[in-house]
Image (cartoon, rainbow, N blue to C red):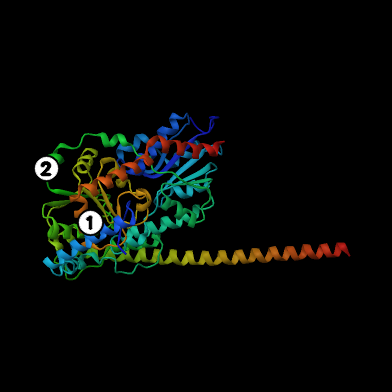
Amino acid sequence: MTASDARPQIHQFVPVLEQGDAIGNHVIAVRELLQRKGYRSEIFAWRSGRSMRKHCHKYTDYPQWSSPCNIMVYHFGVSSPITNFFLKAPDRKVIIYHNITPEHFFKGVNDKIYYILKKGRQELASISGKVDLAIADSEYNHRELAELGFENITTVPLLLDFKNYEVAPGRSVMDMYNDGKVNIIFVGRISPNKKQEDVIRAFSIYRKYINEKSRLFIIGQNHQVPEYDIILNRLVSALGVEDVHLTGGVSQAELNAYYRLADLFLSMSEHEGFCIPLVECMHFEVPVLAYESSAVPGTLDGSGVLFSKKDYSRVAEMMDLIVSDENIKERIIRGQKERLRHFQIDRIEKEIDNSLTSLLS
Amino acid sequence: MGIFKTDMNADELKRLEEKIEGRLEERMKLHDGFADAESKLASPVVNYSDCEMPDVPYELFRAREYVKMFPEEDIFAPKRFSGIRRFYHRVVRRLLRQQIVYNEFILGAVEELNKKLVSLEEKVESLKNTKAEKGGENDSK
């Protein structure tokens, strides 16, 4: 089926489609939604993981489908050759902005990523004024698009597949760590903008001076910025802090196990476009203590506990208070449960459907 | 003013902050100077971003990285390059450098020409307009 079909088609473009990636999951969920609504909808990618190839076409195959009646939805989060291709196509254009990490975080860590991110920001600016609709997945991203001069912007959160969280928690993780120790977690790929180094520094004080019976899990893929992973390992050695576990990438079952074991989620991240783990904490009833930055306050919207200054000693005291005071913990979890309603699939599906189909009317 | 924010009224939050301050004071009595000691341990590892990044495009950065793939021989390395490798690296580095310099030169020249072309187009356009205006004036006379 190609451009000759009379019914308008809505196709998505994503630079990289990888398994276990939040944006990849979102793209597939949106395609399922559009297909359910009766639209012809395919995914086109620049690069894809082996297991994801069945879900997508190469973006260079698109010209045979292209038509001014169609809608191209471009998921933007990194520089890629799709940008030029997207701008030249005759189709109506929608961008879904997932944010670009500011390049300065990569100074002294990875020069290549530094320059790629810088280029990504230039590419994003080149799209401004050339799309029919811009969708931001957080208010923070909305503001960035507005500052760049984008018009007709709407905010729709990421579609999360809550079915993944029903996968039985990994037995080996549960058996190994369900021993009464306080488990502090942070979830997110190993990257200098997420500042796992500061999580380790706060935990070091907590473990050495407040609660010896505790451990820290830093959970997330470590292959994208291996240099930063090395820095984190060096920091653990320099501080001489025990019971810090850098797990690397984990399966869904293992991730669910870590959430079930967690007493507290501690985030020191200085740049998030949305921060899915915060929503996961809401689902798994894990209290959140997070540094107030970028999209974090918007995603939490008053729930959890935020701090405006990285004062490790005070943060460590607050960690202890949340973990040991049931009243405070219950109260935080109650607030987070309330916030979770905002991310329910039905509501978000409706918003995406309304936004995209409004272009076809 | 405290550093924490949560879904509590101002009085409750104040009490919470006071509790934390009290606990921290007790902690400092027990372990004098622990926060400074921790910072001292961490600082050699975490000050990685104190460096300057040259303002070059990614393409040029990548080209320079290719040059680095063919390094000059480290004369203090325990294992020296073979003569043929030393020669090969020297030739490749020179070729790549020439290519980079040439590309930068061409890009600069093209950009300059483009600017001249734009100004020439503007001049032609303004001449056309002047001519059209004069033609209009003559017609009205």
Q: How many marks?
A: 2
Viewer can see residue A44: yes
The secondary structure type at the circle numbered 2 is: helix
User: Which residue type does callout 2 highlight?
Assistant: Met
Q: What is the C-alpha distance between the residues marked 1 and 2?
A: 27 Å
Q: Quadrant of residue B46?
A: bottom left
**Viewer-nearest residue: A166 or A208:** A208
Q: Quadrant of residue A75?
A: top left
Badge 2 sits on which subunit?
A
The nearer-to-camera label among 1 and 2 is 1
Instruction: Say above or below: A328 vs A41.
Output: below
Picture coordinates of residue A251 (x, y %)?
Answer: 23, 40
From the viewer's perspective, tell me whether residue A137 is left or right of residue B11: right
Where residue A32 is drawn, which disc sits there?
Answer: none
Circle 1 sits on which residue?
A318
Picture coordinates of residue A282 (x, y %)?
Answer: 29, 43
From the viewer's perspective, tell me whether residue A130 is left or right of residue B12: right
Circle 2 sits on which residue?
A176
Instruction: Say above or below: B138 vs A151.
Output: below
Image point (22%, 67%), residue name: B73
Q: Are marks 1 and 2 on the same chain?
A: yes
